[in-house]
Image (cartoon, grey):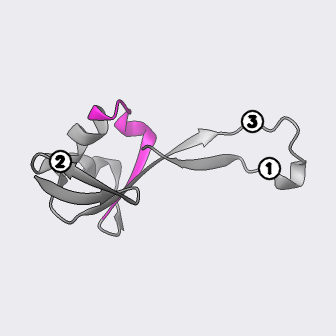
C-alpha cells in the first residue's frame, strides 16, 4: 500500500499507479481536468508519464460552468473550479 494526498484528503492505493489510470478510475475524462503533482502544474501531454507514488501530493480539478439565475451581475464568475473528488 502507498499513502498520498489527493485534493487535500489522504488516499491509499494498492501500489504505485499511473496518473491516467487513476483519473480514468474516477470516471473522469483526462482532457477535462487540470492536475498539480507535487507542486507542479502538469501539461496534459505529461499525464501519461506520471506515476502516483508514496507521499505524493496531487490536486485534480475541473472547470465547470456555473448558473447565474438570481445572482447579481457584479457577483458572477464565468467559471468555478471544483475538485474531482
**Residue holding disc 3:** 67
Neighbour tally class for label 2: few under 14, some 14-19, many 20 plus, Cα within 10 Å? some
> Is 3 located above or below residue 44 in the figure?
below
- Rendered residue at 33%/48% (across/down): 44
Residues under labels 1 and 2: Cα distance?
38 Å
**Residue holding disc 1:** 76
Q: Where is residue 78 in the image (x, y as percent from the top left)?
A: 71, 47
The magenta span reads 25-37
Q: Position of residue 50 (x, y in %)?
A: 19, 53
Sooner in the amino-acid sequence: mark 1 or mark 2 = 2
Q: Pointers 3 and 1 in contact (CB under 8 A)?
A: no
Quarter holding the C terminus? top left
> Is 54 located above or below residue 62 in the figure?
below
Q: Where is residue 58 in the image (x, y as percent from the top left)?
A: 33, 58
- Rendered residue at 11%/51% (across/down): 16
**Residue holding disc 2:** 13
* Residue 19 placement, left or right of 62: left
**Foreground residue among 44 and 66:** 66
Sooner in the amino-acid sequence: mark 3 or mark 1 = 3
Residues under labels 3 and 1: Cα distance?
9 Å
**Foreground residue among 28 and 11:** 11
Query: What is the secondary structure assignment of the residue under circle 2?
Result: strand
Sooner in the amino-acid sequence: mark 3 or mark 2 = 2
Q: Nearer the viewer, mark 3 or mark 2?
A: 2
Please give the label number shown on residue 60.
Answer: none
* Residue 78 placement, left or right of 80: right
Amino acid at each position: 500500500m502507498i499513502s498520498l494526498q489527493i485534493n487535500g484528503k489522504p488516499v491509499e492505493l494498492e501500489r504505485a499507479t499511473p496518473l491516467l489510470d487513476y483519473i480514468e478510475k474516477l470516471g473522469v475524462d483526462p482532457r477535462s481536468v487540470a492536475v498539480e503533482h507535487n507542486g507542479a502544474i502538469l501539461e496534459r501531454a505529461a499525464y501519461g508519464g506520471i506515476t502516483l507514488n508514496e507521499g505524493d501530493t496531487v490536486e485534480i480539478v475541473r472547470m465547470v460552468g456555473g448558473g447565474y439565475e438570481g445572482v447579481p451581475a457584479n457577483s458572477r464568475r464565468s467559471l468555478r473550479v471544483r475538485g474531482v473528488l
